[in-house]
Amino acid sequence: MADSNGAKRWNSTARFYDLLAHGAEKRWGPAKQALFGRMGVDQKILFAALGTGLDIAFFPPGRTIQAIDISPGMLAQAQSRITAYPGAITAHCLDITALPFPDASFDQVFTSCTFCSVPDPHTGLAELYRVMRPGAELGMFEHTGSHYVPFNWLLDMCNPLCRHIGPEMNRDTVANVRKAGFRIHSVEHHFLDVVKTIRALRPEQDRG
Ligand SMILES: C[S@@+](CC[C@H](N)C(=O)[O-])C[C@H]1O[C@@H](n2cnc3c(N)ncnc32)[C@H](O)[C@@H]1O
């Protein structure tokens, strides 16, 4: 059967994902904590994509969060972390490119290593834009291509293999965010620019 949205691929990665991600999580923890620390107490928050829930360790306590992921297998692995979180996380098995939430539903949206993985990042970003209220904040921790040219060649070479397991290594996510209509607030580079913290806003006044 075709796997156009990638769910099957992620279901088969789910059981060993934590093992693969363990080293990176240790390095990335402080950057994720700084970003997710922006989650507000009384804010309507969407988190995409939750995966096995490794990000939950970096959420501030006491928040109420709607979380999505396309893979039932990844969400099943996340269940114990969702239950242990000292706040409220409601997980939905949903495709980020076709969200059922009404327009302007969220005050804040966060992502982590999501837009390296979504097969159609442009539609996914357009959906996030739609469900965010004008003025809402997008906080992303994302795998991207690197400005260091030789290193980017390496990412290009690894890409066919990585794509087979799940993520793409060399996307220009900052440009994609801008193209979707967001205003970039800041971009912070980590680890030879391979991952970035991107903060953006849905402008108060839409482009029209
Ligand atoms: C690299 S993992 C990141 C998971 C988690 N945020 C983390 O950092 O450990 C990418 C996640 O994106 C999810 N995903 C891929 N395509 C998606 C889509 N179209 N809609 C929602 N989630 C998607 C996958 O199921 C997977 O859990």
Image: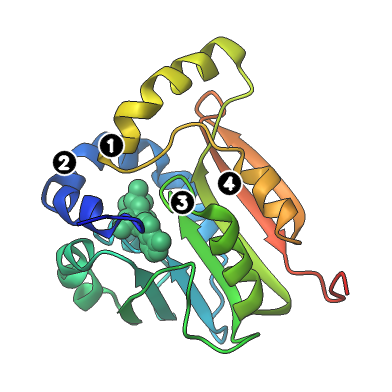
Q: Quadrant of the C terminus?
A: bottom right
- Classify 10 Å Cα crowding around label 2: few (below 14), some (14-19), many (20 and above): few
For the residues labelled 2 and 1, the Cα–Cα distance comes to 17 Å
Amino acid type shown at disc 2: Leu
Between discs 2 and 4, the one toward the N terminus: 2
Q: What element carries label 4?
A: strand
Between discs 4 and 3, the one toward the N terminus: 3
- Classify 10 Å Cα crowding around label 3: few (below 14), some (14-19), many (20 and above): many
Q: Is mark 3 on a helix, strand or loop?
A: helix
For the residues labelled 3 and 2, the Cα–Cα distance comes to 19 Å
Q: Residue 32 carries which label?
A: 3
For the residues labelled 4 and 3, the Cα–Cα distance comes to 8 Å
Q: Residue 152 carries which label?
A: none
Residue at screen point 13% across, 45% down:
16
Outermost residue toward the front in this view: 1
Q: What element carries label 1?
A: helix
Amino acid type shown at disc 4: Thr
- What residue is pinned by disc 2? 19
Q: Residue 197 carries which label?
A: 4
**Is residue 109 among the parts visible in the rendering?**
yes
Between discs 3 and 2, the one toward the N terminus: 2
Q: Quadrant of ligand 1?
A: bottom left
